Amino acid sequence: MAPQTSKSKAYIVVLLASLILPLVLPECYSSVVVASAATKPKFSDVDLLEFPLNLEYLEAEFFLFGTLGHGLDVVAPNLTGGGPPPIGAKLVQLDSLAKDFLLQFAFQEVGHLRAIKSKVKEFPRPLLDLRASSIAKLMDRAFGRTLNPPFDPYANSINFILAAYVIPYVGLTGYVGANPLLQKPSSRKLVAGLLGVESGQDAVIRALLYEREAQLVQPYGVTVAEFTNRISRLRNKLGKAGVKDEGITVPRAEGAEGRVMGNILVGDKNSLSYARTPKEILRIVYGSGDEHVPGGFFPKGGNGRIAKSYLK
C-alpha cells in the first residue's frame, strides 16, 4: 500500500502547485505560458516543405520549355499531379553554353520535385503563366514604363537568362527563411540540400550576367547590370520587407565589406543570405505585392496549405 499512497500524495502536491503557483507568481507563470505559445510554429514541417513545390514547378517548366520545347508532361508526367500545363512557355534558340547549363538546371528541378514529393503529400502543379506578354509586364513594372517593343524572354539567350534571373533567387530566400522553423532533422537536411543547388543556380546566372554587365540589351539601350538592378528593386518593393535583393552591381559602400562594386552573390552586411517568408514570396511571384491577390506567374494562386490559407 505504501507505493500507492506515495503516488497519491505526489499527485496531490502537483495538483495544488498547478493551482497555487499562478496566484503566487502570476507574472512568472504567465510569461512561461506566453513563451510556450510564441514558440509553437505556425506551420508544420509538412507545410513548409510542400510550399516550395510551387516555385520548383515554376522553375522546372520554365527551364524545360526554354531548352527542350516541352515540359514535365513529357519529361516526368508522374510529377505533375494532374495539374494543368503551363501557359505560353516556349523553346529558345540558345547559344551552346546557355543551353548546356540551363538544361542542367531543368533536370535538377525535376529532381527537386521528386525529392520533396518523397517526403510530403504532393499537390497538383498549379496553373503557371509563362507567356512572353506576362514577363514583359513584369519588366515594364521594373522600369516604370512600357518597353517598346515589349520584352520577349524567348527571343534570344541574353533575354532568357535575364528572365531566369527573376526566378531561382526568390526560391532560395524561401529556403533560408524556412530552415530555422523546421522541427525535424530530416526536414532541415532536405532544405539544406535544396538550398545548396538553388544557390548554385542563382550564382551561375548572376556570374554569366556579370560577365556581360556593360552589354546593352537590344533594342532598349539599357545595360544588363541595369536590368538586374531594376528587377531586384521591383522584388524588394513587392516583398514589402526591406532590402533583400540586389543587382549584379551595387554602390561600393553596399558591396562586400564596403570594398567592391561587383555583386555576384547577394548578401547582407555580413555577406549572409537573406531570408523571406512565404507571404513575401507570394507577394513577389503573384506580382501584386499582396499574398491574398494571385496573378503574375500564378494567375489562380499557388497550391498547398500555406498558399491556400492566404487565398481564403
Image (cartoon, rainbow, N blue to C red):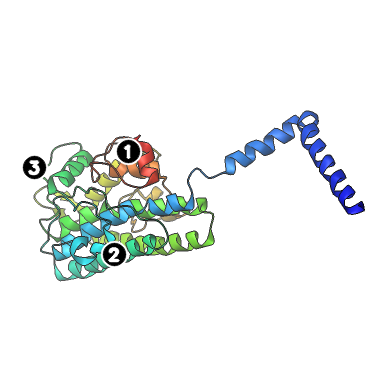
Q: Position of residue 137 (x, y in %)?
A: 17, 41
For label 3, the SS is loop
Q: Quadrant of the C terminus?
A: top left
Q: CA distance from mark 3 to mark 1?
A: 23 Å
Which mark, residue 148? 3
Picture layout, residue 25 above or below residue 246: above
Q: Position of residue 57 (x, y in %)?
A: 28, 55
Which mark, residue 237? 1
Q: Furthest-front residue in view?
A: 1
For label 1, the SS is helix
**How many callouts does the rendering have?**
3
For label 2, the SS is helix
Please name the residue that numbered disc 2 is placed on. 110
Name the quadrant containing residue 299.
top left
Q: CA distance from mark 3 to mark 2?
A: 35 Å
Q: CA distance from mark 1 to mark 2?
A: 30 Å
Given the image, on which type of amino acid does mark 1 rest? Lys
236 horizontally vs 222: left or right: right
Q: Residue at x 68, y 35 (%)?
A: 31
From where the camera sits, is residue 241 visible?
yes
Sequence-first disc among 3 and 2: 2
Given the image, on which type of amino acid does mark 2 rest? Val
